[in-house]
Image (spheres, rainbow, N blue to C red):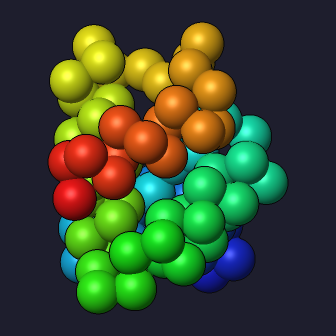
Amino acid sequence: ENSLQKTSTCSSVNPSGIFVSPYGLNLSSFTKLIKRLQERHPEFSKQEIMKAVQELRRINKGVLNGLTISSIEEKTSAIL
């Protein structure tokens, strides 16, 4: 039971309340995107970067499917 609870908690919301999802990307692509954005914008925390990606998703009608990783990176950078 405890392991099920950990799994559902980790895959839905992190401790700061930000929904953690691949945003329509596979997890590998999402991880790569966050890493690239952290390297490009070291002045922003990972949480701030994730909020910016979430904002881009909201602006894009809830999905990021169909956008390239580089396009998502550029648009997220503009939000940051």
Q: Nearer the viewer, residue 65 or 4?
A: 65
Q: Nearer the viewer, residue 2 or 35?
A: 35
Residue 76 point in image, percent of width and height: 35, 46
Q: Is residue 64 above or below residue 44?
A: above
Quadrant in the rendering for residue 20 = bottom left
Q: Is residue 34 above or below residue 74?
A: below
* Residue 31 located left or right of residue 10: right
Residue 34 point in image, percent of width and height: 55, 64
Which image quadrant: the C terminus? Answer: bottom left
Which image quadrant: the N terminus? Answer: bottom right
* Residue 60 located left or right of residue 71: left
Whether residue 50 is visible here, answered yes or no, is: yes
Residue drawn at point x = 60 percent, y = 66 percent: 36
Q: Nearer the viewer, residue 25 or 40?
A: 40
Q: Residue furthest right?
A: 28
* Residue 35 located left or right of residue 37: right
Q: Is residue 4 above or below residue 44?
A: above
Residue 15 point in image, percent of width and height: 31, 80
Whether residue 45 is visible here, answered yes or no, is: no
Q: Is residue 60 above or below residue 32?
A: above
What is the count of numbered marks?
0
Residue 39 point in image, percent of width and height: 54, 78
Quadrant in the rendering for residue 6 = bottom right
* Residue 68 located left or right of residue 54: right
Residue drawn at point x = 48 percent, y = 24 percent: 64
Residue drawn at point x = 21 percent, y = 24 percent: 59
